[in-house]
Amino acid sequence: MKAERLLQYLDEQRRWVHALIEQLDEIQVAFNARYDEFKARHDATLARLGEQVAARPDALHPRLRAAIEERVEVERQRIHERRKRIRDEYLPARREAADDLLRKAQEQMATLRKLNPRLNEREEELKGAKARLEARLAALNAEIGEKSRGLGVVWHFLTITKADRERQRIIGRLEAINEELYKVRREWEREREQVEKKQAELQERWRLESVAVARLQAELDRLDDKASREALALRRAVRYVLDNLKEPMPGPDPELNAALEEMITLNIQTDEYHEGLAAVSGFIGLLRGIDGGLKAIRQSVHSLYREQQMHSAYLAPLYFILPGSVQAMSEQWPILAERFADEETVGRHPAEFAANIKPLLEGPFSEKQIETVFADLGRMIRRATARW
């Protein structure tokens, strides 16, 4: 096919890929929405059943009881490590951070207090100079007024002129002093506002650090109590074993057995959701990678096509032979589009979706096959330009 047709073909392939990504995005949204609802039910069941099991270990199958006892040892070690880290690392670090914030706040206030006397002294100097100039200006105004009466303007013309010049200089200096006073007062206002803002930020950060310290200290107090540690280890062990229970282990209590069966069902469904979410996310990533590869190939073909047009007198027209691997991949798009068309229905069956995706990832969309497709496209371009 000619370059123009190949560019159109690549655009068509990318449109198929984009449409499939949109479909899969909808499926992913459906999976996540259903998983959130399911997870709430799963966790509530796990919490309720955990309390029942912890209260009645004698009603469990011996293998299930042994699994919990074995897990208790693991949880004890984890609690020991957590306790040590809180005492030796987390609490000291949080306390140091809180103390550092207090130190910074104190330093800022000290800086502001140092600034205040300096600016206050400068303001008083300016105010004093202003008062002296205003007094001199009043005296000059009075003098000029007195000597300007009647024919005094004629007799005292030079004196009045000299006094008026001095008055204008004083007025200019007063304006400069007023401007300087404004700057001093504005500087103080800016510094005060900045310090107040920083103080508020530091106070909030200190509050959060203090809350963290209090929580860690409360946790450490609980972990320092042996009975509390043992109870926590048992609860965690029970939760872990029940959360990973996949096969029935009936004990002497039919009611508890029924609850365990429900937990097993929820655990299997959890795995199915995880598989479905991983499958849809992985396939979306794969399609985006294919789209990126097709985009790069299109850019290469378009650049060659423009070069051929610019130098048509010297370069032979481009002609591309589409590889069979590329044609085979293009045949998959409508099949996949039809398979994922009903996003709502597909979104209700995560395990089925994962099962359907698996043969695709092992067959037409395997890593090896995708590499073959783009290697063949590269060779196609090299063959097309061989005559150049």
Image (cartoon, rainbow, N blue to C red):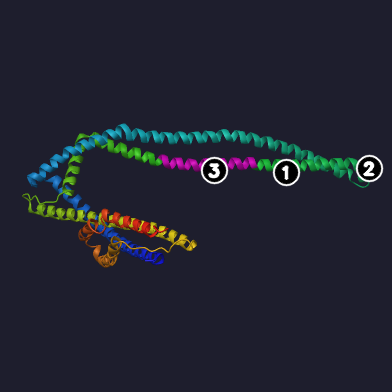
Q: How packed is label 1: few (under 14 Cα within 10 Å), some, or many (20 or more)?
A: few
Kindly check if marks 2 and 3 are in contact, taking CB atoms under 8 A apart as contact: no
Question: Is residue 101 one of those drawn in magenta?
Answer: no
Task: Please name the amino acid that badge 1 sits on.
Answer: Glu
Task: Kindly identify which residue carries mark 3.
Answer: 193
Q: Position of residue 286 (x, y in %)?
A: 30, 56
Q: Quadrant of residue 84?
A: top left
Q: Left or right: 244 with respect to 338?
A: left
Q: How packed is label 2: few (under 14 Cα within 10 Å), some, or many (20 or more)?
A: few
Task: Write the start and end of the magenta stretch as one range.
Answer: 183-206
Q: Residue at x 84, y 43 (%)?
A: 164
Circle 3: element type: helix
Q: Position of residue 287 (x, y in %)?
A: 32, 58
Q: How packed is label 3: few (under 14 Cα within 10 Å), some, or many (20 or more)?
A: few
Upstream in sequence: badge 2 or badge 3: 2
Circle 2: element type: helix
Real-space CA distance between mark 1 and mark 2, rounded to the nearest whole angstrom: 32 Å
Upstream in sequence: badge 3 or badge 1: 1
Real-space CA distance between mark 2 and mark 3, rounded to the nearest whole angstrom: 58 Å
Task: Please name the amino acid that badge 2 sits on.
Answer: Trp
Q: Quadrant of residue 181?
A: top right
Task: Kindly identify which residue carries mark 2.
Answer: 155
Q: Is residue 165 above or below residue 7?
A: above
Q: Nearer the viewer, mark 1 or mark 2?
A: 1
Task: Kindly identify which residue carries mark 1.
Answer: 175
